[in-house]
Image (cartoon, rainbow, N blue to C red):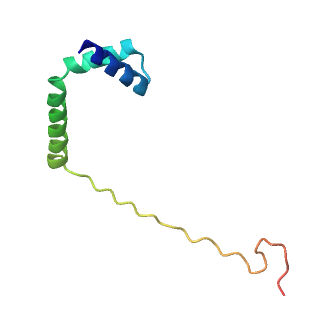
Amino acid sequence: MHGFSQTCEGFLSRLVGLNARRLSGLLGLAYKCRIRLPIFVSATFLLCHLVLKYVPRVEINVQVVEEEEEEEEDGQDGSGAEPR
């Protein structure tokens, strides 16, 4: 079984692009946090739920007021041609 573990780690390290020692460290850290991670995810979900449920929403209404530009004279349209 020890050989399968090394083969699996070798495949994963090539897949992810990490060397075997670093991947072993990451897998060891994940194993150590196997209890804390679900608790952390649950606490995060509860916190987001409380914030969305009980913190009042602020509505911001923005109105854009456009100023009317002065109309240019008929003969000055920027093309340089004279009107007929």
Q: Is residue 17 left or right of residue 48?
A: right
Q: Position of residue 22 (x, y in %)?
A: 37, 14
In which quadrant of the rendered view does residue 33 lie?
top left
| Residue nearest the viewer, comparing 27 with 9 | 9
Q: Is residue 7 left or right of residue 33?
A: right
Q: Residue furthest bottom?
A: 84
In which quadrant of the rendered view does residue 10 lie?
top left
Q: Residue at x 32, y 15 (%)?
A: 6
The quarter of the picture where the C terminus appears is bottom right
In which quadrant of the rendered view does residue 19 lie?
top left
| Residue nearest the viewer, comparing 62 with 35 | 35
Q: Residue at x 18, y 23 (%)?
A: 34
| Residue nearest the viewer, comparing 20 with 1 | 1
Q: Position of residue 72 (x, y in %)?
A: 70, 75
Q: Is residue 19 left or right of residue 78?
A: left
Q: Position of residue 40 (x, y in %)?
A: 18, 29
Q: Residue at x 80, y 72 (%)?
A: 79
The quarter of the picture where the N terminus appears is top left
Q: Is residue 79 left or right of residue 54?
A: right
Q: Residue at x 29, y 14 (%)?
A: 3
